[in-house]
Image: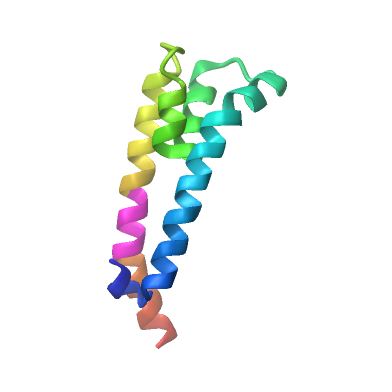
Amino acid sequence: MAKMMGLDGTGCSMAVVFVVVTGILGASVGRKIMDSWKVSDPVARGLGLGVAAHGLGTASLKDEKEAFPFAAIAMAGVGIFSTVLVGVGGKAIKAVLG
């Protein structure tokens, strides 16, 4: 996929770093932030952490039985959407930009 988008090794390495940092931050402070903002709806908590902090954020909700499934669904949905966007969208953007 990196070759398709024209990324070299550096771009991929930086992407990995940002993904890992995002997951760690989301897992460590995501629940605290939602608590401080008084987000109590399990659907909102699950979707928020699943989308923003992917696997680690989803794992951090393992104790919240009602929010956890929504986090897992959101994480999977973002993965599917990202793959389609990069695969199809990348080719379309390259075709438009030349």
Percent x, y of residue 32:
64, 23
Residue 79 as seen in the image, left or right of residue 27: left
- What residue is shown at x 51% (from left), y 31% (from top)? 27
* Image position of 51 with respect to 88: above or below: above
- What residue is shown at x 41% (from left), y 11% (from top)? 65
Region rendered in magenta: 81-87
Q: How is the image coloured?
A: rainbow
Quarter occupied by the N terminus? bottom left
Q: Nearer the viewer, residue 25 or 88?
A: 25
What type of secondary structure mainly makes up the magenta span?
helix
- What residue is shown at x 36% (from left), y 70% (from top)? 90
Percent x, y of residue 52:
51, 40
Residue 78 visible, this angle = yes
In the orientation shown, which residue stands out farthest toward the bottom? 98
Give the number of callouts. Answer: 0
Residue 53 as seen in the image, left or right of residue 6: right
Q: Nearer the viewer, residue 19 or 78?
A: 19
Magenta region includes residue 36 = no
Quarter occupied by the C terminus? bottom left
Residue 24 as seen in the image, left or right of residue 37: left
Residue 48 visible, this angle = no
Where residue 16 sits, quadrant-wise, is bottom left
Magenta region includes residue 82 = yes
In the orientation shown, which residue stands out farthest toward the right? 36
Q: Nearer the viewer, residue 62 or 24?
A: 24
- What residue is shown at x 46% (from left), y 24% (from top)? 60
Percent x, y of residue 10:
43, 71
